[in-house]
Amino acid sequence: MKNMKKPFHLILVFFAITLLISCGKQKEENHEQSQSEKTEEHQHKEENNLSLNSGELWIANMETTQGIDNMIGLMSSFTDKESVEAYAKLKTSLDKEFGTILKECTMKGESHDQLHNFLVPMQAMFEGLDSSDLKTCKVSYDTLNNHLKKYPKYFK
């Protein structure tokens, strides 16, 4: 499984870059930074920047909300919590939903930026799910599960 981490990480970086490009995230002053530098920079400060829309929920596109709901369903129906192989399979299913969310992104402006703030931290949470260490898998599962439950507190 260790051999799969590097390609998976590259795929996640590709998806993050695709999200940035497809939703018009690039700004003129950032053209000098490489896409990977932008992604890394965002990963360090994303969750701290998640906020409401002047006290109101952000409006998300239907595909995003459905994808998050599907991920929550996958997490809640996951029962084989003593098997690292089962966590790896869960990760594969979650990756598919995550990819669909990125592909179907139609959001613009600040609502898109806030969605980005919500999604990017999930990449690190996914990585722990295919660990060969059961404790790491469990911690990643719990962290991701708690994170997904925050979605309805920021988006509708």
Image (cartoon, rainbow, N blue to C red):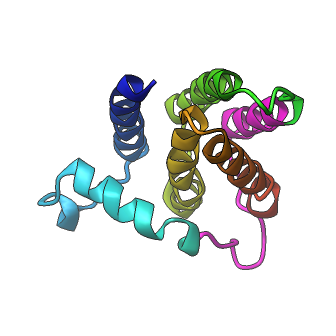
Question: Where 127 sits versus 28, above or below?
Answer: above
Total count of labels: 0
Which one is nearer the viewer's eye here, 85 or 126?
Answer: 85
Q: Is 115 or 77 nearer to us in this picture?
A: 77
Vertical arrangement, residue 47 with respect to residue 135, above or below: below
- Relative to 11, is 101 on the left or the right? right
Residue 156 coordinates in the image, percent (x, y): 79, 52
Residue at the extreme bottom: 54
Quick check: 94 left or right of 21? right
- Indicate the quadrant where residue 152 lies: bottom right
Q: Classify 43 as above or below 17.
A: below
Magenta-drawn segment: 50-75
Task: Please state the horizontal and vertical placement of residue 110, each as a whole percent of the image.
Answer: 54, 64
In percent of width and height, residue 114 lies at 58, 61
| Residue 100 drawn above or below residue 137 | above
Residue found 55% across the figure and 33% down from its top: 132
Please tell me which residue lies in front, 134 or 118: 134
Residue 27 shows in the view: yes
> What's the residue at 40%, 31% (across, down)?
5
Q: Nearer the viewer, residue 26 or 43?
A: 43
Q: Which residue is located at x 46 percent, y 70 percent? A: 45
Q: Image quarter for residue 94?
A: top right
Is residue 106 visible in the rendered structure shown here?
no
Residue 146 sits inside the magenta stretch = no
Q: Position of residue 131 (x, y in %)?
A: 54, 36
- Magenta run includes residue 55: yes
